[in-house]
Amino acid sequence: MRILFFVLSAFLLSACSQQGFTSVFNSLTGNFSESSLKDECEVFPYDNSDSACNLYGWQTFAYQSLAHTKAEHQQALTALGELNGDTYKRLILLSQHHETVNVRLKATDTLFAIAKANDNSFGHFFYILATHNKQDLVNKKNAIYLNAKLKKQTQTSAKLKAELISAQAKIEAIMDIEKTLNTN
């Protein structure tokens, strides 16, 4: 899933400029170097602009935050200030797997709203990120449902197995009584 996320992000990042188009072409032909874009970007603005460096910064931030431990996640949230970029970063962090379902849903809905308000590569990136988070939540909901269904079926199976053992014991008892009656 992370590879897909990275590839989609690279295409969005690359689509924002002619230089980006060259990077997409180079990546398809095997000549793309992530460090070349990293070297070209002295600063990642972390705003809602359409610049390649901005999108590369967002892609890098989102990708790295997916690998956070719970402690690193909390530390990243605590370190954020009140700048606009920090607000976006907070939403990305709040929409990820270390948060509760309700917090993730609210943050993901906000990411969709930001994506809708920004009709550029930044908005498209946030749309892809929000879509990924929404699908992850759907998958988790389905997993919870299927686990509950499996637990119920396991309980039913155990109950039926106990009833079968009981019925077999009764049949054996009846057969023993019948043998005793036939021998007398």
Image (cartoon, helix red, strand yellow):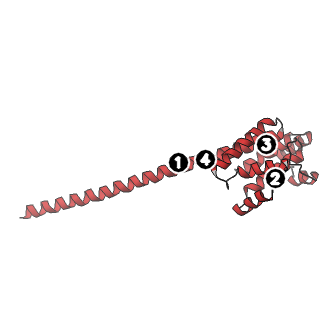
Name the quadrant containing residue 68.
bottom right
Question: Mark 3 belongs to which amino acid?
Answer: Phe
Residue of label 4:
139
In the drawing, what numbered circle is on residue 125? 3
**Residue drawn at x 87%, y 47% as measured from the top left:** 54
Question: Mark 1 belongs to which amino acid?
Answer: Tyr
**Residue drawn at x 89%, y 53% as measured from the top left:** 38
Distance between mark 2 and mark 3 Cα atoms: 12 Å
Residue of label 2:
60
Q: Give the mark nearer the N terminus: 1 vs 3.
A: 3
Position in image of residue 43 (x %, y %): 92, 52
Position in image of residue 142 (x %, y %): 56, 46
Q: Secondary structure at mark 3?
A: helix
Residue of label 1:
145
Q: Nearer the viewer, mark 2 or mark 1?
A: 1
Distance between mark 1 and mark 3 Cα atoms: 30 Å
Where's the C terminus, which quadrant?
A: bottom left
Q: Label 2 crowding class (10 Å Cα cut-off): few <14, some 14-19, many 20+?
A: some
Name the quadrant containing residue 77.
bottom right
Distance between mark 2 and mark 1 Cα atoms: 33 Å
Name the quadrant containing residue 39.
bottom right
Q: Give the mark nearer the N terminus: 3 vs 4.
A: 3
Of residues 175 and 114, the one nearer the viewer is 114
Q: Give the mark nearer the N terminus: 4 vs 1.
A: 4
Position in image of residue 149 (x %, y %): 48, 49
**Residue drawn at x 24%, y 61% as measured from the top left:** 169
Q: Secondary structure at mark 4?
A: helix
Distance between mark 2 and mark 4 Cα atoms: 24 Å
Distance between mark 4 and mark 1 Cα atoms: 10 Å
